[in-house]
Amino acid sequence: MDSATLKATQAPLKDAYRNDAGKALITLRAKGSVDDAKIACKVETGRAIAEAGLHPATGGSGMELCSGDMLLEALVACAGVTLKAVATALEFRLDGAAVEAEGDLDFRGTLGVAKDAPVGFRAIRLNFKLETDEPQERIDSLIKLTERYCVVFQTLNTRPELRVAVDAERPVAKM
């Protein structure tokens, strides 16, 4: 896709969202079901079923996907798509690009071994490797805009409001 095609595709969407902000509000959903036989959760990805389980550092077999890895994969996917879209819109000469994310975890927090150890990532690093002959100022602009418009990056960076709800179904007593 070239810049003109991208802009033509996005123009009516942008106009609609400017005229009616409500049209831009969309709720994305993810669903999963807990496995009865093992410590795992089957997540519906829209394309397939992904089975998430414990990381080997917390007693998992390594056969299931680790949710922490999935979070980093979502960041890489979103940053890569955003980078490509921004590069296309800017007519940025990009001969190739790679995106990597890595995050530091202290599993003592997850396992409740040390109360001072955080549960979750202590740090996440997002790295881009670009093949381009563009000047540094254009590269800096590309990365700044990618960071600004990457949904997963901004979600991690700004911490959204989180709520947890429970809908517990009780088995019906048999007589």
Image (tube, rainbow, N blue to C red):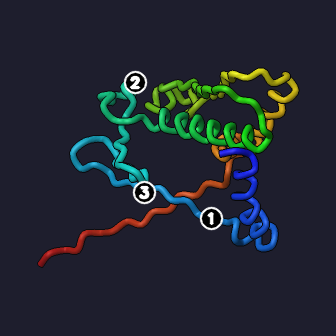
In the rendered structure, find residue 26 and report the number of the disc placed on it. Answer: 1
Q: Amino acid at mark 1?
A: Ile
Give the Cα distance between marks 3 and 1.
16 Å
Q: Is disc 2 in contact with disc 1, using a CB cutoff of under 8 Å?
A: no
Residue 125 appears in the picture as rendered: no
- The quadrant in which residue 52 appears is top left
Q: Check disc 3 and report the residue beneath it.
A: 31
- The quadrant in which residue 128 appears is top right
Residue 138 appears in the picture as rendered: yes
Give the Cα distance between marks 2 and 1.
36 Å
Judging depth in this view, the residue of 23 and 166 nearest the camera is: 23
Choose the circle earlier in sequence order: 2 or 3: 3
Residue pictured at 83% horizontal, 33% vertical: 141
- SS type, badge 2: helix
Classify mark 1: residues with Cα within 10 Å, few (<14), some (14-19) or many (20+): few
Residue pictured at 63% horizontal, 44% vertical: 152
